[in-house]
Image (cartoon, coloured by chain):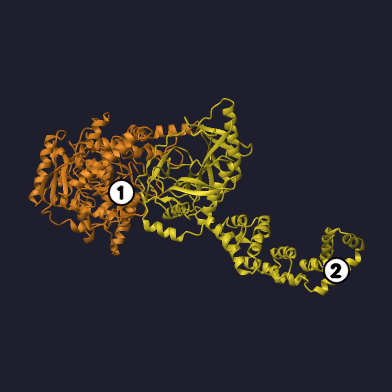
Amino acid sequence: MSWEVVIGLEIHTQLATKSKIFSGASTAYGAEPNTQACLVDLGYPGVLPVLNKEVVHMAAMFGLAVNATVAPRSVFARKNYFYPDLPKGYQISQYELPIVERGELFITDAAGNEKRIGITRAHLEEDAGKSIHEGLDKSSGIDLNRAGTPLLEIVSEPDIRSAKEAVAYMRKIHTIVRYLGISDGNMQEGSFRCDANVSVRPKGQEAFGTRAEIKNLNSFRFVEKAINFEVERQIELIEDGGEVVQETRLYDSDKDETRSMRSKEEANDYRYFPDPDLLPVEIAADFIESVRAELPELPDAKQQRFVEEYEIKKDDAAILTISRQVAAYFEEVAGATDANAQLVANWVVGELSGALNKDGLEIGDSKVSATELAGLLTRIHDNTISGKIAKQVFEAMWAGDGSADEVIEAQGLKQITDSSAIEAVVDKVIEANPGQVAEYKAGKDKLIGFFVGQVMKETQGQANPGQVNQILKAKLSG
Amino acid sequence: MALHTMTMAELTAGLESGDFTSVDVTRSLLDRIAKHDAQLNALITVTGDAALAAAAQADADRAAGNAGMLNGLPVIHKDIFCTRGVKTSCGSKMLDNFVSPYDATVVERMAAAGAVVLGKANMDEFAMGSSNETSFYGPVQNPWDLECSPGGSSGGSAASVAARFAPAATATDTGGSIRQPAALTNTVGIKPTYGRVSRYGMIAFASSLDQAGTITRTAEDAARVLGVMAGFDERDSTSVDVPVPDYLGEIGESIKGLRVGIVRQHFDEGLDADCAVKVKEAIAVLESLGATTVEVDLPNIDLSVPTYYVVAPAECSSNLSRFDGVRFGHRAENAEDLFDLYCRSRGEGFGDEVKRRIMTGAYVLSAGYYDAYYLKAQQVRQLIADDFRKAFADVDVIAGPTTPTPAFRLGDKVDDPITMYLNDIYTIGANLAGLPAISVPCGFVNDLPIGLHLVGTHFAESTLLRCAHQYQQETDWHMACPEDFA
């Protein structure tokens, strides 16, 4: 039987506020346990939550960015359950009336077509703390630094049909929240993670199969692997005559498998009800318009503009628009040089990205600034150096040896464009390789590459390759 | 005149003219508490040293010309208000070991105005009760009859003020917990509009109903203290940013022309006949002062008690989840695992009434019952609020009895929760609608005091205080002092 996979994702994005969603404590990552938890975060008797207005602003930005409705009135609710990392015994979240509803975004599916993924809702909530088991004997510790960190939970429609699509969707959300500056998207630190609802059904069947929810996936790779494992598990189970049970599962990345965590029967009754300590969030239409006005250019629009305005390849435009910083870098270089924009794109996507990756740097920390790279590309454009020499110059620039011109000057890398100088070298090469010359003349045209190579070797790569080619051909046919 | 018999107004005059110091007053009242509280059990904690230090500071402030509104005046805080460095038990074993690391806004504002805190008042556990019998620290006795309950949950606050331990005490009211004990102890109790006083630092029972107020012997003193307590607090999202009027300044204005609404249902069966007579006499006094009476209808008011007993338990079941034995409060020893730790810590730390309400609340919020109970109760709550809104189109205040009977005997109702709950039948409506209300002494039935209940529109505290004050100018019920505590 042929199966269809149905996936919906719940993405938890940590919002990049300085302080927590309902208290003034800092949200900075990595502090000593419990040093960033105030009385409100600790759920002390008598304390009350006060909404950090910035989270409303951020959620509204997200809503507008995914073409959703930003609710004029949304309500915080309490999700009640007991757990040591949940100080109040309830999590403040949004339930019946979320702040964002009915959005969408577009991904590219396996066939290369644009595909719409619906976004059911996005709601604000507070994160819990975490339990610590390592290094403690017969007891568990609790670190409440993370308790009260603002999260935006983004829930997709079950429109996703493969693990690859799930990753594409998640990446798209990741790009959007970083564009908006509402999340750092740092997956190692847990700022961006997701739960995947996975089910399978026979192709053509309308009704959904029973789903399993895989919790807490914190990398794109794990999302893909966990879903693939789960899909296979479910198909095998059904084909062997079994039934999928509705349950929560955990992905074990070491063993690359998902394991049952708790079944539907064991699921909590969260006894949601509106939080009486917080007023409904009322958002006026003019606030929404002011947020709309300040929205940055979003990845899809930017990508399209790059293709149209700079006439670069769509694939390159996609990579260059992966973050606002990369896009800005590209535009700064392109604006500062007469070199062809595709050449700029090639360099940013190629040499520069490679160097950044190698050193583990973000583009903001690049050792070669946009202006400096523009300087280098200008020298390719005006034939001062060849593309090949340029790579050598770039390496020196990356190592801190100065600007392109300084490196070219210091290392004497200026391209030889003087025809008589090139002719002299060509003559020397022809003289030194009589055998090859004879073969070439006998019709072995491919040997031209050998001669070019020899000339370039003699000139340490500084001869203008076009001229070398031209002169060689003229002389060899003479 | 003995210092303990004086109101805040009288004490302020004496302090100002140098007849005595705050240290004198504080010492005198602390002595009185030491001597008499064994009979009443009104206080859980007495903060004598801190009180004397605060009194000395108050005297110094006054000498330096920096006397605040409550300078040197002794007060007692209900043990529901967090007080830094002092045990804040909320009447529960659960918090018997809890020393608050911070001050509630109410505590902070009163301290800033120069108040001297003598101690923390006994109360029903987590403010759940109408007789003070649910307290882990034992019931409070009514100074008017030691066999009787002073009412609850603010029974310790009311008994303290009635017994002249302090001229004023803070209290809280979720369904009548200020007004009912005030009525049963011959004191003035005001529950302000929901949002008028910050709830920050006041341990939550039912967040949408809880409101802090005062118990005093005169409306004038209530005006003084409320003026300090009230006002917007950015730490409480439900506190309202409306300017605080000059309650004390407006209290002397006449009530001529005031339209007083009388709710027919409030005088139906259920109200003790003698109480009805006294309340009607009190209303006649208001008329003699120029007020007019109008009959008003609150068609859904009979639903207020059942509505309350869905909404309040629902909220409390969630509010009390934080008492889990993990970070503060009572923790069971030798728990086998996490679940056992929760069950035993909560099982040991909470008393029966609290458990009953948590169970009820969890039930009405659970899947499958939410719509039938919680949601329905919220709808009825809205109807009741609408009834009040319509009634206040024609009247300025609604007058009636605070309680159906005078104080009942300790032990009489403790095993019958429903009868106990009906004690709040006249007071709960104001909580559901978020309205301000006051109880003022209006006479005695079988030698036990009862109260006149006045409800106003949102933020009409000034009208209520003025009405009560004018009434107290005409009557002397509030001057009566229980014999054993004269």
Image coords of residue B144 (percent x, y): 19, 39
In the picture, measured across the screen, residue B177 lies left or right of residue A336, that is: left
Q: Is residue A413 visible?
A: yes
Image coords of residue A143 (percent x, y): 51, 45
- Identified by mark 2, the residue type is Lys
Identify the residue at the far top of this view. A241
Secondary element at image label 1 = strand
Identify the residue at image location x=10%, y=53%: B257
The chain identifier of the residue carrying mark 1 reads B
Chain letter, yellow in picture: A
The chain identifier of the residue carrying mark 2 reads A
Q: CA distance from mark 2 to mark 1?
A: 111 Å
Image coords of residue B140 (percent x, y): 27, 38
Q: Is residue A410 above or below residue A37?
A: below
Residue B416, numbered circle:
none
* Residue marked by disc 1: B118
Q: Nearer the viewer, residue B476 or A438?
A: A438
For chain B, the rendered hue is: orange
Check the picture and name the quadrant holding the N terminus of chain A.
top right
Q: Is residue B464 above or below residue A232?
A: below
Location of residue B309 (image quadrant): top left
Identify the residue at image location x=58%, y=28%: A237
Identify the residue at image location x=19%, y=59%: B249
- Identified by mark 1, the residue type is Leu
Which is closer to the viewer, label 2 or label 1? 2
Check the picture and name the quadrant holding the C terminus of chain A.
bottom right
Q: Is residue A92 above or below residue B269?
A: below
Q: Nearer the viewer, residue B147 or A222?
A: A222
Image coords of residue A108 (percent x, y): 57, 48
* Residue marked by disc 2: A475
In the picture, measured across the screen, residue B292 lies left or right of residue B311, that is: left
Q: Is residue A127 visible?
A: no
